[in-house]
Amino acid sequence: MKEKFLKGVVALSVAVVFVAEVATVIGGAVFLSALFFCGEGGQMVGAQATTVTMVNDVETQTSNTTPTNVPLKVIVDAGHGGKDRGASGASGVTESDINLYIARRLAFELEILGAEVALTRDSEDRLSCEADGHKQRADILRRREIIDKFEPCLVVSIHMNTYPDKSVRGLQCFYQEGAEEGKKYAVAIQEHLNKAGITNKTARPGDYLILEGKYPSVLIECGFLSNPEEEKLLATQEYQEKLARYIAAAICTAC
């Protein structure tokens, strides 16, 4: 048995994340355990190895080593679900499915960066049940219960956009009017993604129920399914994973 220490630098556009990996080579097989470093402004502040667990309705992450700084706690919310498919594109692709894939991948990318992560929705199902009278409100209330239980530093809700003018395109961040912390995160994430060349828009206040909670929240409309070119991109796994990587780096930089 021999141990091989690998150090790498992962550059995500203007954000730089330092990753140190310890690889143990046994009989030709490589077993990796990772120590991830991430902090304010993307600076290296500590190390930890992480494990993800799904407890009933909340996915949580634990560390088997003690980090030198308090880990960032993020809730990733995949909008819509179940019979509520959200927006749809001309090809038939639905917002709900894309939201879920990007949310799962974003959670994965944030875990790599050392964050504690929970998902409000980790399946195709909606969070409300058939007995609920007002299903949309019941769905949002259930999401808020999960958020309040986790007590995050930041809530990030993933959505897709649509607009009558099919030429409109681009990712955009929204925050609750008057919520200064939410605005700070939304602006920082938007600016990072603009510099990365993902989009070129301005963070704006938005009237969304998911933003009305007590924790700083950002809703990210990842693109327009009404734009034919962007719809094709958003429907591909490659682009979905690219968005997740850049959004994770932007969150890390903003926090």
Image (tube, helix red, strand yellow):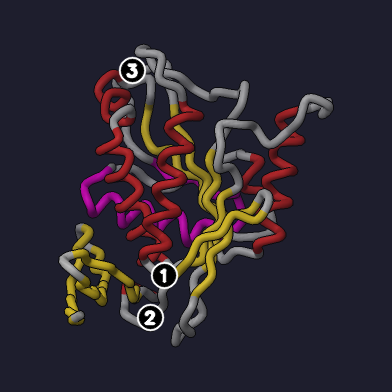
Q: Of marks 3 and 2, which one's residue comes earlier in the chain?
A: 2
Q: Which mark is residue 47?
A: 2
Task: Look at the image and tell me in which quarter the C terminus lies.
Answer: bottom left
Residue 237 part of the magenta segment: no
Residue in the foreground of this view, choosing between 251 and 70: 70
> Going by the image, does 36 lie left or right of 27?
right
> Going by the image, does 213 lie left or right of 2?
right
Q: Which mark is residue 166?
A: 3
Q: Which residue is pictured at 42% across the width and 62% down the height? A: 111
CA gap, disc 3 and disc 2: 46 Å
Q: Answer whether labels 1 and 2 touch (C-beta < 8 Å).
A: yes
Q: State the residue position of label 1.
A: 114
Identified by mark 3, the residue type is Lys
Q: Is residue 148 above or below residue 120?
A: below
Q: Is residue 222 above or below residue 117?
A: above
Give x and y (percent) for residue 58.
Answer: 63, 53
Task: Look at the image and tell me in which quarter the N terminus lies.
Answer: bottom left
